Image (cartoon, helix red, strand yellow):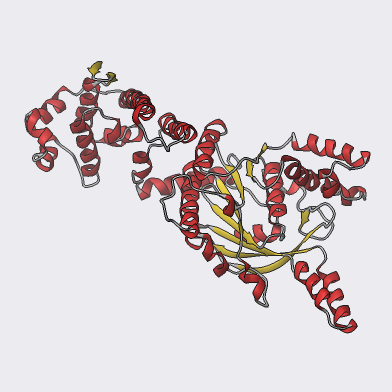
Amino acid sequence: MTAKADTGYVPYDIDLEQAVLGATLRDNDLIDTASEVLGPEHFYDPLHARMFEMINYLRTEGSVTPKILYAVMKNDPGVKETGGLTYFEALHGAAPSLPPIKEYGRILKDLAARRQLIKLGEELIAAQADGPQWETTAALTDRAADMLGEIVDGTKAGERRRPTNSVDAMHTLAQKIEAHQAGTDVHGYLTGIQFIDQHVGRMLPGDLWFDGARPGMAKSQTATNIARNVAMQGMGVDYRCPEMTLDQLSARIACEVDYDRCEAERLEPMPYRDLIQLRAKPEFVERLIFARMRVCDWAQIDLFTASMVLEEIEADSRRRARKYPGHRLLIIDHLQLVTVRDLRRGANRTEEQTIITKRLKELAKELGWTILVLSQLSREIESRDDKRPRMPDFREGGSIEQDADVVLGQVRLIRYAGEKIKQAKNEEQKAVAEAEYDKLLGVLSIAVLKNRAGGDADYHDIFIDEKSSAIRNERGASVVLEAELPF
């Protein structure tokens, strides 16, 4: 059935809505079945929406009958207009026996989606006709894409806010555990960096990770290493970094992939700098092509170098979640490059980053992705004796301490050891500084500063090849053998 409205046709089916409500009043066992498909927002008639919501609420207290429903809703204006108890009893009496309640629900849900599509079209027309001039076409397009995605996916805000019974949540958790232990479903992926995997475990859907350090401390190398490792295990990766070119990002990944061969075949590591300067020897070009062939066998790593506006990241990620359903890793390199388009006037950078971190956490939960955000830490670290990042160093980054599930800190102390050599006042001091420098060559220290699911872990040394920038658990060794990865 359709009704002629001022702006066009509005699809709805009152008879079907009445059939669903009557069926749930006659057989309360159908309430749970209907709720698996329907929410109050799927009913066209506002009274029917309120009735369905109340029926679900009363179900938690016991049985639901027309008289009980009327007793709690008798002051509702819509109830008075329709005849009160007489209308409820009529729904109960006219309900079909053995109704295909799920099919009814799917039809009503589809009609609701059609109404939303009509509303979306009307809003877009209105926005073009008399909307605010400051809203750009790109912003309008992103907003429309988000709304369309919510209609397609059924991820409307109302559905996301609907509570889940703890019994149902525990049942779902038990099913996930059984599927994971049986090997029929992979729950989370290892970073491939053994120290992190031992203390944190897997990167799980909905997790928000941060990795913080001063500039020049190999954050991007750590991120590309993790991207390579999870792609080997079968998880797709979106890597967003406007500061680096596609040549730089792809060269980092290629060096990571190629380094696996170096120890086994006693090869010279591929020089990262020569690759991006386009001056690599023919031998390295051949190895670059071989690395490309290996990456083709893994899950996709997609590189993005456009500017990072939060609203664009959200809209694009939702589109990609529809295209690539399931667990995925989003890497943002780095937090300080992300901006908010709709930021209130007068807001400072800390407020902006608080908005960013909170919305990224919501995005991770909504999509079932893991989001890894790299963060540049303040210069205050440089002024103290201990140069290793600590949790308080993240306080200028918004609400990272509250929103993050895992926070990593990392440092290359060799950067500071080089300064000591320059500052040496005599040969003895210079010799001591040079010895310390040599000891720190190739060392990258990483700590788990926060782990919501477990304990923290202080700084531990892993290794970075100075020539290729490849990161490894042990000096000169591959991070992890493919045969050891959990598929």
Image height of 425 relative to 152, above or below: below
Count of numbered circles on the image: 0
Image height of 194 relative to 274, above or below: below
Residue 85, quarter of the rendered image: top left
Q: Name the residue rendered at 11%, 25% in the picture.
A: 90
Q: Quadrant of the N terminus?
A: top left
Point out residue 14 in the picture as x, y percentages from the top left corner: 22, 22
Determine whether, in the image, residue 486 is placed left or right of residue 105.
right
Point out residue 171 in the picture as x, y percentages from the top left corner: 42, 46
Q: Name the residue rendered at 54%, 53% in the picture.
A: 208
* 167 or 456: nearer the viewer: 456
* 168 or 83: nearer the viewer: 83
Is residue 84 in sight in this rendering?
Answer: no
Q: Quadrant of the C terminus?
A: top right
Determine whether, in the image, residue 138 is placed left or right of residue 417.
left
Point out residue 106 in the picture as x, y percentages from the top left corner: 35, 25
Point out residue 461 in the picture as x, y percentages from the top left corner: 74, 66
Q: Name the residue rendered at 18%, 39% in the picture.
A: 64
Determine whether, in the image, residue 128 is placed left or right of residue 29.
right
Residue 281, quarter of the rendered image: top right
Image height of 154 relative to 275, above or below: above
Is residue 318 in sight in this rendering?
Answer: yes
